[in-house]
Image (spheres, rainbow, N blue to C red):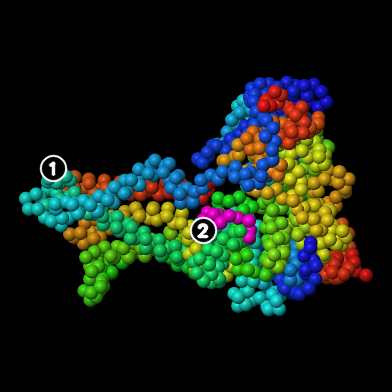
Amino acid sequence: MNKTLLDIQNLKVSFFTPAGEVRAVDGISYTLNAGEVIGIVGESGSGKSVSSYAVMRLIDPPGRIKEGKIMFNGMDLTQADEKTMQSIRGNEISMIFQDPMTSLNPVFRVGNQIIEAILKHQDVSRKEARQQAIEMLRLVGIPGPEKRIDQYPHEFSGGMRQRAMIAMALSCRPKLLIADEPTTALDVTIQAQILELMKELKQKINMAIILITHDLGIISDLCDRVIVMYAGKIVEEASIDDIFYNPKHPYTSGLLNSIPKLDADENQRLVPIEGNPVDLLNPPAGCPFAPRCKHCMRICLKENPPFYRVSDTQKAACWLLYKDNPEALEELGCIKEG
Amino acid sequence: MAVLEKAAGNETLLEVENLKKYFLAKKGMLSSQTAWLKAVDDVSFNINKGETLGLVGESGCGKTTIGRTILHLYEPTSGTVKFKGRKIDKHSIKTLRRHMQIIFQDPFASLNPRMTVGDIIGEPLDIHNLAKTKNERKDRILALLEMVGLNPEHANRYPHEFSGGQRQRIGIARALAVEPEFIVCDEPISALDVSIQAQVINMLEDLQQELGLTYLFIAHDLSVVKHISDRVGVMYLGKLVELSPSGKLYKNPLHPYTKALLSAIPVPDPNLSRSRKRIILEGDIPSPINPPSGCRFRTRCPHAKPICAEAEPVLKELEKDHFCACHLFDS
Amino acid sequence: MENNIVNKVANNARNEAEKRIIKIDTSSFEPVGKEERISTISSRENLTYWKDAWKRLKANKVAMISLYVIILITILSIVVPMVSPYSYSQQIRGDEFQRPNWKHWFGTDGLGRDLFVRVFFGTRISLGIGLVVSIMILIIGSFYGAISGLIGGKVDNIMMRLVEILYSIPVLLMIILMMVVLKEPLQQAFNKSAFLRSLSMVGPGLISIFLALSLFYWTDMARIVRGQVLSLKEQEYVTAATALGAGKLRIILKHLIPNCMGPIIVTTTFQIPSAIFTEAFMSFIGLGVDAPMASLGSLASDALNGIYSFPHLLLFPAIMISVIILAFNLLGDGLRDALDPRMRK
């Protein structure tokens, strides 16, 4: 059995804007084992990125972690001071971002940026660090790393920059890598290269990955487990096969139905999810998805549904599941029939 | 698509012949030397009335430039575009603007933030004097809003009050205001949330049926293009490398680039993801300022031969309606 | 396995913390129709750009105080000369060189003129100059900049070189020159035409200040608007308007200018005090308004004669200039924060 690396408990992150409180992450809990790849899927405003930035403690004002615990290797990161966080960031937890164009500093050589990262966290000489940096660039498939290491970011193409970013993120062998839409800004064929690289690295290095994306195709390619988020809440959490072949939450199945498939029949019409995304400044009272849900029931408009255990590898927050099987409730004893 | 039967009339609406569009590019920040960026380099195709032609390709392939050059938003470097047999130039475009419209990718940048939705949709009516009275203008605006699934009360609001999907609907209503026959859809859903994309695709399909529209649908997402298009053109570095009915293209891709592109799409199906073997292309897309000689794809092509560096392959009809430009099929 | 149990325990602990009781009955699971479902989405109050900016400006105390001060001074400068028992040019014999007292709140000058009226009359003239000059700068600068930016290419090149030439000329020197040169022809023009004669009330000195300032100070505005237009014209809504067949004038008036209104307003707000300041300086060195007309600058200049004996003659106009300029600058800062689109969420 794998060891739990990250245990997030009832995490709430809010942004306090002049227009009111935006509950970007509204009470999510999940665990991640060492070496596991978990995908967080959701649309813009679902809180998928914010929840991961919270793990790095990179929430800037007016945002704030309001409640909850982030247990990383037995330490609560929400209570850690800035100095501790600095020694964790880039060392034990690394992050790669969506835009490789802006995440490398244009005035420093690519190699120096990696070397600095290594020197900051490891007790090695500059020469050794340089050697390590070259090895990392080789690992992420940059040809001629001895030469490339002294080049500037603008001499790298988009795909190469993302590789360099990955090399930098991995340079200290982190236990957890957070990848925030790592391929969204890239072209399809370059995206395929990066996905292949990540698959390879996943096997070579035993590290846990949180992959944030809106693309279900990428999830199916890389992940072991999937968390589906909607309006700051987790609506379904399951193994990858359960999510794609046996989705329980209407939002998950709606998403799957609304994407065109390459092998589909030519005349097949798409089945969209109706309505518009939630206004987080003004969320609905009950289940956030209720106003867009075809199966909406009276209770959905009033009460946010608790989680139901569908199987050992799958749970979802939907009142339909209670109707089908009231026994499978995770939060015991909160329902009163009358 | 069901529109295939309708398009069987095969009446050509738009003819693009040897279209080239080069942009002037500076070589370095400090150097005064200039070079030509060959965004679109000798591309020809036709679009039939009532059909949807899809254009796919990666960044820098020239698909957006083609759309904008057709609408004469860019002056073509050479080559001609004919709409209903009439050549599009500086003068004819003034009257043709009413018949050809465009829908943009970014629903946040394509609407003027200082205008109400009613004024945005009303602007084309004002420009072309399509509404004689104030009441007529208002009625037209409300009818257009209804056509794209928005409420009448939305007319007095400002764009920032709407979500991405709703803004895209406003953009579509604006394009429809002049009752065009032909619409360039320039990545109309790429910036939208997944759950909203299908709404917009379905609406575009419905509008095509109702109004008999012809689309040039530009996108980088092949699964979307396949879904909506009757025929698909694949572009690489300013060239059209393959053109085929969409079903054929996906069942039997001929060009090595098309094959790689198809296999690169991540599919939302774990079993398929595990079992299929991807074609991973080496390297990056070369710069369109200095493209490779001969076949532009040869630097990344797994089947490149010596001839590919020497001669440029021409687009040939290899099967019925299925065109491909590749030396692999030289007999 | 152990891990799962730990999780269970943790889960239960969490549940203890926020145990909620949900009551359900048979009606809870009745399906809800689409209409009712959608009606549950309440829309929040939405603000236009201007309302939103106003809201932010209101939250800025310094800027609001400045705004109130400006409004107060403007009202006083209109009302005081109207209701005061003395006129600005009236010489009261026997009341020369008085210190502030109940009859003359700010005292009187060497010719027995009431300083209170003169200071507010001077404020009226100074504010008027600031306003008129800024409006002229606004019109010339924004059109020049918008045209230059929108057409681009060679036209832009030539128009901007012209701006640079104007920029490289020492402005003060040119203004002095123009005021000297313009004064005579203006005087003659007033004498000839009946229409222009009505303007002679204002005086040729004042008009040449208007002209000189607006002819040289619009370059900043032109540059700012051009920069804005250059970035705005790449926006897709401008392309959309072109694709719809909109002409250049329509694009400038409907799309470009409304979208650079923010920077234009901010620049204008900063332009007003700078025009007032330049005018005060001109008058101070004796090139401004003609006597007996008063501006804050000419008042300060006149006060120099008896500065050691009657410092209050300098003090009041000087305070007024400082307050006006400070208030406009602080308001300008506040407006920049309120109108800056980057601040918008």
Question: Of discs 1 and 2, which sits in the foreground?
Answer: 2
Residue beneath disc 1: C102
Task: Inspect this view and state whether residue C340 appears.
Answer: no
Please name the amino acid that badge 2 sits on: Met
The magenta stretch spans residue A6: no
Tell me the element at label 1: loop
Is residue B205 or residue C70 the one in the foreground?
B205
Residue at (78% x, 73% y) in the render: B9
Residue at the far left in the pictured view? C94
Residue A270 in the image: state x and y as whole percent. Answer: 75, 53
Residue beneath disc 2: B115
Depicted C197 relative to depicted A49: above or below = below
Disc 1 versus disc 2: distance between alpha carbons?
Answer: 56 Å
Horizontal relation, residue B39 to residue C99: left or right = right
Horizontal relation, residue C317 to residue A20: left or right = left
Is residue B25 or residue A287 the one in the foreground?
A287
